[in-house]
Image (cartoon, rainbow, N blue to C red):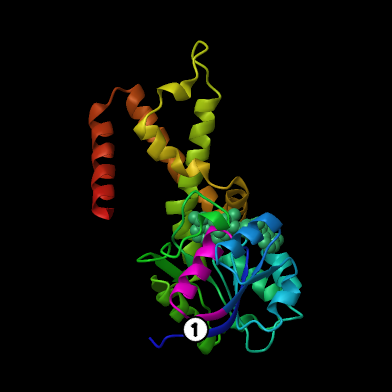
Amino acid sequence: TAKPSIGHLVIVGVGLIGGSFSLALKRAGLVGRVTGVGRSRDNLELAQRLGIVDAWTHDVGEAVRDADVVLLAVPMSAFESVFADMAASLSDHAVVTDAGSTKQSAIAAARKFLPNPSRFIAAHPIAGTEQSGAGAAFAELFEKRLCVLAPDPDSDPDALALVKALWHQVGSRVVCMGAAEHDDFLAAVSHLPHLAAFALVNAVRRQSYEGHDPFRFAAGGFRDFTRIASSSPEMWRDIALCNSDALVKQIDAFQAELSGLREALMAADGESIMNEFKAAKEAREKWL
Ligand code: NAD
């Protein structure tokens, strides 16, 4: 693919994802200048000190006026208001994309508020850490990671080609799929695990064993299982709410698995338990 070149990139939400995208494009020499838009002055000043943005503002309308590309990397609940605030200022040639974790809701928000939704290309880089804010950003975050694009038949082919090329240039493998399909898969492999990690930590937190702090006895297994319970509560509340139908189906599936194990335990059915554990171990090892 040809190397894209962007004169003015605007990042709305200069956190882990938005900051890393800017750093990666700057490092590749593909962007002239970057303007950051956000809520927190401290975070935006930090982003400028770290060389993530060249300038910043709280005013998204002002920022996007001469933007060539705009990336939304804010929590999902902010999408509608950010699109609404930029709608009147976007130029005809601007391409808008996002990094949001749920795609049907992002596309619905773009259709509702953007003057030319065909120049919005929905994207989701499947890369992240449990850290947030500009200080957590690093240029290598997207290397060798998958980035899902969810274009639709109305998507402008030039806008799609540009967004594809950008994610390719930051090191990602790009795949295109339908937004609903994306949301179903991600509910299973990302949204449910986060919900389960938050729930497990709470289940333990609520128990006190004769005055002992249960976390004192936790070690590697607990640490690995619950790392993602350190993720941003705001971000994960939004993701859960934006993909609630698919997530509820996954909760039901998980509950059925747990019930099956519970029954086997009550019946002291070691063979069933062994079969379940074996099948899971095999599937995980095949994935890794
Ligand atoms: P983050 O908290 O590091 O960054 C989000 C930034 O947006 C913060 O700096 C926050 O101050 C700012 N912000 C919040 N509301 C705003 C508003 N109304 N206007 C402007 N700025 C606003 O979060 P992140 O991890 O970079 O996630 C950003 C987006 O990317 C989310 O939609 C998330 O679902 C998605 N995502 C996250 C991951 C991950 O693992 N962290 C992975 C892929 C996609």
Residue 241 higher or lower than 162, as above or below: above
Magenta-drawn stretch contains 30? yes
In which quadrant is the N terminus drawn? Answer: bottom left
Residue 84 painted magenta: no
For the residue pair 191 and 257, the one nearer the viewer reads as 191
The magenta stretch is: 14-32
Secondary structure, magenta segment, majority class: helix
Residue under the image location 52 percent in, 80 percent down: 31
Q: Pinpoint residue 208: horizontal percent, then vertical percent.
A: 52, 17
Picture quadrant where residue 73 is located: bottom right
Residue matched to label 1: 162
Height in image: 180 above or below 244?
below
* Residue 181 horizontal/vertical position (percent): 47, 65
Q: Of 23 and 100, which appears nearest the observer?
A: 23
Residue 257 image point, x, y percent:
39, 39
- Point out residue 263 in the picture as x, y percentages from the top left corner: 37, 28
- Res 102 visible: no
* Left or right side of 10 for 169: left
Q: Which corner quadrant of the image does residue 41 belong to?
A: bottom right
Q: Residues within 10 Å of mark 1 (few under 14, many from 20)?
A: many
Give, as a three-letter code, the residue at label 1: Leu
